[in-house]
Amino acid sequence: MIEFKQALQIVLDSARPLGSERVDLNQALNRVLAEDVPSDMDMPPFDKSKVDGYACRRADLSRELVVVETIPAGTQPTRQIAPGQCAKIMTGAVVPPGADCVVMIEQTEQTGDGRIRFTTNETPDNIFPKAQDVRQGQVVLPRGARIGPQYVAVLASVGRVRPVVAKLPRVAVVAGGDELVDPGVKPGPSQIRNSNSAQLISQLGAMGIAAHDYGAVKDVAAEVARVLKAAFAENDVVLVSGGVSVGDFDLVPSILKQLGVKLLFEKIAVKPGKPTIFGLAESGYCFGLPGNPVSTFVIFELFVKPFLYRLMGCDYTPVEVQMRLSEPVSRKDTERQEWIPVKIVSREEVRPVEYHGSGHILALCQADGLIRMEIGVSRIEKAEQVSVTLS
């Protein structure tokens, strides 16, 4: 049994990038950039007005000014601003040459015959200078960045309509156990619905990865071997939930070895999730996840997600915040690092949710994140600072 940090390092060190491809901009969300993206222009590309108002010389603010033209956004000025002159200008329009500030309309009054007067004592420049945000050639998005909606906007603004992104890993989801029935089936005696496959498919979907679902497999060695062999042939990564412990019907570890998978670890000092497997096949990778749904969820978040992102050239770390416990947490078994679901109850505090163990998946729906108790720690006191890994 190895500790969390060692297991995670083994997983991450094993990942090899899968290559890259070009995609249309409207397909880039949730992908990982496989190239640095430079800007093809300055941003703003010109001195730009922040407000609707009048572009003029600051030296002329104490006198009446003649309005020489109107400049809508998207048009070029036709006049240079000379002493005693100004141009009416709209938000986002090009500031004409000669002007060094834009006075808001609300700070002016009409004096007749195309003239205006400044009515307050001072004004900011109200100008976005050319290249204030980005200079031409500057890298705006780096290789390895995960593309969120704001990244899509940046790609569009620099004209990168077919960015180069990492290929998505092909991921198989397999559930093992005689007791499993499909979610649409009413379980009979000694049966449960297969929730792990749906959960893993959704966790992958949140990463932008479409899983290949191989359904639930009975605890029959030949059948497990057949499905796993097919899954390895058709995918880069195989996720198996259930059948990975040491029971009489936990067939997955021995079958993986028969299929030539080199298991790098078979137990980890993590709760929930002790009987977690990670192995290397000739054509890919395999995770054996515990059958209890909380274990499956947590191990995916702690190990599988960072691994899949590493395959795509991205170093992923979950979001953590420091908060205080609203009540103490204690335990007897301190041999493993334990992850406990908590709910945020104020801006500074979290409290543990009611949690009955690794089969209690509803607890995760009532939680905002997880805290961890390290090996050897039996109690965390009320008001003590904890790291909260947000869901």
Image: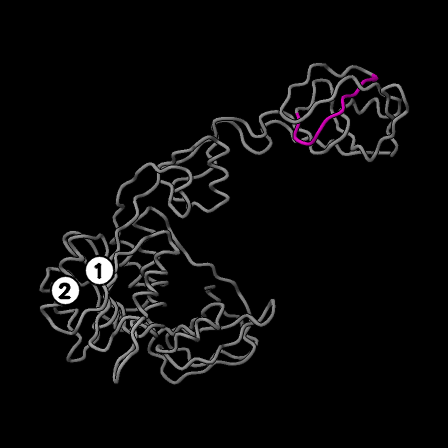
User: Looking at this view, is 222 or 135 the one in front?
Assistant: 222
12 with respect to 100 (left or right): left
The residue positioned 83% from the left and 34% from the top of the image is 107
User: Looking at this view, is 308 or 271 the one in front?
Assistant: 308
Q: Which residue is mark 1?
A: 286
| Amino acid marked by disc 2 | Leu
165 with respect to 287 (left or right): right
The residue positioned 23% from the left and 65% from the top of the image is 215
252 with respect to 169 (left or right): left
Q: Residue at the right extreme?
A: 111
* Quarter placement of the N terminus: bottom left
The residue positioned 40% from the left and 48% from the top of the image is 30
Colour basis: one colour
Of mark 1 and mark 2, the one earlier in the sequence is: 2
Q: Which residue is mark 2?
A: 256
Tell me if label 1 and label 2 are in contact, CB under 8 Å. yes
Find numbered disc 2 in the image and state the secondary structure of the residue it sits on.
helix
Q: Position of residue 82 (x, y in %)?
A: 78, 14
Span colored in magenta: 84-93
User: Looking at this view, is 19 or 361 the one in front?
Assistant: 361
| Amino acid marked by disc 1 | Cys
The answer to whether residue 93 is above or below residue 237 is above
Q: Position of residue 178 (x, y in %)?
A: 20, 76
How many discs mark residues in the rendered view?
A: 2
Q: CA distance from mark 1 to mark 2?
A: 9 Å
User: Looking at this view, is 331 or 376 the one in front?
Assistant: 331
The verdict on residue 375 being magenta is no
The residue positioned 39% from the left and 78% from the top of the image is 360
* Quarter placement of the C terminus: bottom left
